Image (cartoon, helix red, strand yellow):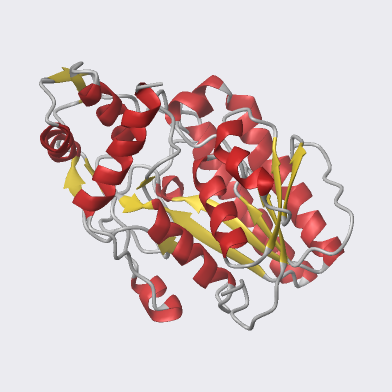
């Protein structure tokens, strides 16, 4: 099935296409018979993620920083804007680049969509809700964000990107779509990513202590990347322009996910507690009522099966 679901092959541009989610999206688009131009500068993306795609004649790659103006020859049907550092380690290492890709990068990608008369998808984040005072978080919740804290560079970049996207929709009539993506995991994440699942799996497979911040009672929801990509593709085929949450509508504590990963890996690791980082969200769970109603979407991959697939990927990485 193609993007439109009408048997028409389309040309898609994916910024950040060498990243974790971006590369899975490129793979799915190609599998569905579409042409893909991947744009990335490998600041946080990995060339290995797209190496298997280069053999496909429908795939092309442009090494480019989208914080600079984007020039693409020929028609473009849909732009997926996923370029951004996404893990705390990366966006705190590259704070200015994170702010620039969320502001200038979004502006340039929207400008390309306007000039090509193409549809536009923005990968936003549950981080726009900050450390939420409402649980679960519906799209109507405006959030509790510290704009000058260490996480502010990512949170505010995405909040600005949403505002810019809606402005292009309202002023220029660009067919825009916004997904607020909650914790997602799967193969192609990096060992040194800093996010819970890859950190715990890497530590467990090497029998190192699993580092739990705080007392581990803070909650997260965990969505497998294949479910997320399906949600993204349903969203771009819909008439939804306001943000839509995509994630698993159940939560578990960080301590529970650590214990589960130790169990699934058969690791001898113990749990080691560390000081909770500044502004670390205490709860994180999406209200996906809009996704269910507008897209007919909800995650279907069981957590244990998804974790096993991700563990197998990290085993292969660590054995190289």
x 27%, y 61%: residue: 249
Classify the position of the C terminus by image quarter: top left
Q: Is residue 273 above or below residue 129?
A: above
Answer left or right for 294 relative to 222.
right
Comparing 273 with 266, the one in front is 266
Q: Quadrant of residue 135?
A: bottom left
The single residue placed furthest to the front in the displayed view is 55
Comparing 207 with 167, the one in front is 207
Comparing 86 with 150, the one in front is 86
Mark yes or no: residue 44 visible. Answer: yes
Q: Is residue 238 above or below residue 122?
A: below
Answer left or right for 176 relative to 184.
right
Answer left or right for 12 relative to 158.
right
x 25%, y 40%: residue: 282
Comparing 176 with 197, the one in front is 197
x 34%, y 69%: residue: 298
Count of residue discs? 0
Q: Quadrant of residue 156?
A: top right
Mark yes or no: residue 280 visible. Answer: no
Q: Position of residue 193 (x, y in %)?
A: 42, 28
């Amino acid at each position: 099935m193609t993007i439109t679901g009408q048997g028409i092959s389309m040309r898609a541009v994916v910024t950040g296409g060498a990243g974790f989610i971006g590369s899975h999206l490129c793979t799915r688009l190609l599998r569905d018979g579409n042409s893909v131009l991947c744009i990335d500068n490998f600041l946080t993306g990995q060339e290995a993620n797209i190496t298997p795609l280069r053999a496909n004649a429908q795939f092309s790659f442009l090494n480019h920083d989208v914080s600079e103006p984007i020039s693409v020859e020929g028609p473009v049907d849909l732009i997926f804007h996923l370029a951004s550092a996404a893990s705390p380690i990366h966006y705190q290492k590259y704070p200015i680049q994170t702010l620039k890709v969320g502001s200038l990068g979004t502006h340039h990608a929207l400008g390309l969509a306007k000039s090509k008369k193409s549809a536009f998808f923005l990968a936003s984040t549950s981080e726009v809700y900050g450390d939420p005072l409402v649980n679960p978080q519906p799209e109507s919740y405006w959030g509790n964000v510290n704009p000058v804290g260490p996480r502010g560079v990512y949170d505010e970049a995405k909040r600005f990107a949403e505002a810019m996207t809606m402005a292009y929709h309202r002023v220029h009539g660009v067919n825009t779509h916004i997904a607020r993506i909650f914790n997602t995991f799967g193969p192609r994440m990096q060992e040194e990513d800093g996010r819970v699942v890859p950190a715990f799996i890497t530590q467990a497979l090497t029998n190192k202590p699993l580092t739990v911040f705080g007392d581990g009672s803070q909650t997260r929801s965990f969505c497998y990347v294949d479910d997320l990509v399906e949600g993204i593709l349903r969203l771009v085929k819909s008439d939804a322009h306001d943000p839509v949450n995509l994630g698993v509508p159940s939560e578990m504590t960080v301590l529970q996910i650590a214990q589960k990963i130790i169990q699934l890996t058969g690791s001898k690791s113990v749990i080691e507690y560390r000081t909770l980082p500044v502004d670390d969200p205490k709860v994180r769970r999406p209200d996906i009522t809009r996704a269910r109603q507008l897209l007919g979407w909800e995650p279907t991959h069981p957590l244990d099966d998804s974790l096993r697939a991700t563990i197998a990927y990290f085993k292969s990485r660590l054995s190289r």
